[in-house]
Amino acid sequence: MQACRPCSSPATGLISSSIAWRNLREHVDGIFDLHLKDLLQDERRCRNMIKEYEGIVLDYSRQRATSCTFKFLLALAKEAGVKEKIDMMFEGKHINKTEDRAVLHVALRAPRTEKIVCDGKNVVPDVWDVLDKIKCFSERVRSGSWVGQTGKVLKDVVAIGIGGSYLGPLFAYTALQTGAELVQLLANVDPIDVAIALNGLCPETTLVVIVSKTFTTQETMLNAKTMRSWLIASVGKEGIAKHMVAVSTNLKLVKEFGLDPDNAFAFWDWVGGRYSVCSAVGLLPLAIQYGFNKVNQFLEGAWSIDSHFRCAPLEDNIPVILGLISIWNVSFLRCPARAILPYSQALQKLTPHIQQVSMESNGKGVSMDGRPLDFHAGEIDFGEPGTNGQHSFYQLIHQVITAVYSPTHVCEPISNHDELMCNFFAQPDALAYGKTWEQAKAEGISDDLIPHKIFTGNRPSLNILLPTLDAYTLGQLLALYEHRVVVQGFIWGINSFDQWGVELGKSLAGKVRVSMNSVRMKGEELKGYNYSTTYLLNRYLKGKTLYKLHKSMLLDVKDKVHLRDIRQLVLLFFFDLIYHTTITSYT
Ligand SMILES: O=P(O)(O)OC[C@H]1O[C@H](O)[C@H](O)[C@@H](O)[C@@H]1O
């Protein structure tokens, strides 16, 4: 077993130049020779790799790691100043340096009596003002005392948002679903998504919630305008206040959009979009659908993990351990892909949400001070609920790629889920042990088939077991993943709170938008694009388009959307593109 070298501060500013990092780099060579089937025989090692907090069990004994690995990883966490960075986060310091902002999503779930200071002000009372407003408003909608312009009770709610203003709420909302839903979430600007959301809805009994942190996101604003026109056509401009509310940090733009500031639910720039589930972004739809009690439990669950994250020693701190496991796999074992596999259908939207939280946060190529990283950072996240995933992409994990690490099995044990649970318990061992030639032979498999039926195993995984799945444990699960991602960013020394790459795409789309408008409205020629883009754009502009249909369907048809018509056109357009692609690739 190797001894830990004493740590020293990184000389170049990158964590990779620290002694702790170098210790791990040397240590990893020895790990490549170990197999999980041998590591799993060491009961003492396995016992040390199981942690429990409030009934949540984390078992990471199927990681390709020894207890020495964890000593080195903990030394790395200390070297990177993880504890100090956690404190700075809770103290409201501007740790999002490129945007000069604090990172305080933890303040969103702080009890009323807590004090969390940002820029000299305790923000907890502001948080609770909005929570009280959500409680009051949601109770009025649920009880039917908030009526629409024509006096009818509201029966449907459409929440429009995208990215963090959609994925997080969708995850929490879906996880708590029990049956009849009042609320639907709409993200895509594709008219078919709008049409599906509006199908069968009546403006007189519909409430629209616009969810956008910035209130400038093109897709959301376009969908919001479409919905506003749809409402006005039935209830008039004066009816909007009864049928439209907003969640945003930008109350000025909310007002300019024509909404009563009383109908706006605020949050703050110290809440990142992908960390905003516990703001009004996620809580308003949850409260309308499930009642404010559930919201409270959800917040309490998240806060229980926040408190654990802040206070538990690094070696027992579950989000820190999870973050270290990620660092180990990505940067040292060079396994950048992670499957997240919840063995619970209710958690079907966990993976898409964590995909954004993780990949947008840690998909960074430079350190906080702008230095290019000389190591692998960031993860590729994918997944499906178990057992669906087993019948889809598991074959590749078992036999082909070694670059997938820690399929994270999250499970909720309920007695009549036994079949599901059998799979949950079988998969980690199947991945770890694989199957040898000798085993296959002993099973009587014929020689020609044996190569297809042997598996090298040694595929690492970790298991998280929840005692149950309710609003409280859901809040815990959310906070565990949020903090895990943050820990990774703290160690890699990157900024997990900005997303300038996304901004690049947005600004290019803005340029195309202007060009498209000039061609359509003024008949101008396209200028300033490369050959390929000019060709494709012209081809699109000449082809059949949903543009006219979109207008007539949503603006003129008051209460019935013709889904069949729109689908037909979407398909025509789609095949147009396939045809086009085929021609280009064969000439
Ligand atoms: O909430 P909004 O301001 O409309 O932003 C919605 C989304 O926009 C972009 O895609 C950002 O990268 C996301 O982080 C954000 O959640």
Image (spheres, rainbow, N blue to C red):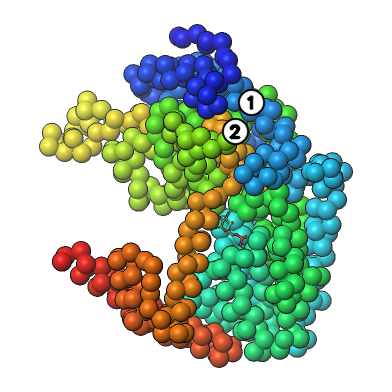
Kindly identify which numbered label has been placed on residue 292.
Answer: none
Compared across the picture, whether 439 is left or right of 479 comes to left
- Is the residue under label 1 in contact with that under label 2 (CB below 8 Å)? yes
Looking at the image, which residue is at 29% across and 30% down?
Answer: 456
Kindly indicate the quadrant of the structure image that contains residue 85. Answer: top right
Choose between 99 and 478: the one closer to the eye. Answer: 99
Residue occupied by mark 1 = 81
Q: Where is residue 579 shown, x and y percent of the image?
A: 24, 73
> If you read the primary sequence from the N terminus, does the residue marked by circle 2 or circle 1 appear first?
1
- Which amino acid does the dot numbered 2 rest on? Phe
Looking at the image, which residue is at 84% across and 42% down?
Answer: 120
Residue occupied by mark 2 = 490
Looking at the image, which residue is at 47% across and 67% down?
Answer: 511
Disc 1 Cβ-to-ligand 1 distance below 8 Å: no
Where the C terminus falls, by quadrant? Answer: bottom left
Element carrying mark 2: helix
Q: Where is residue 384 shown, x and y percent of the image?
A: 45, 51
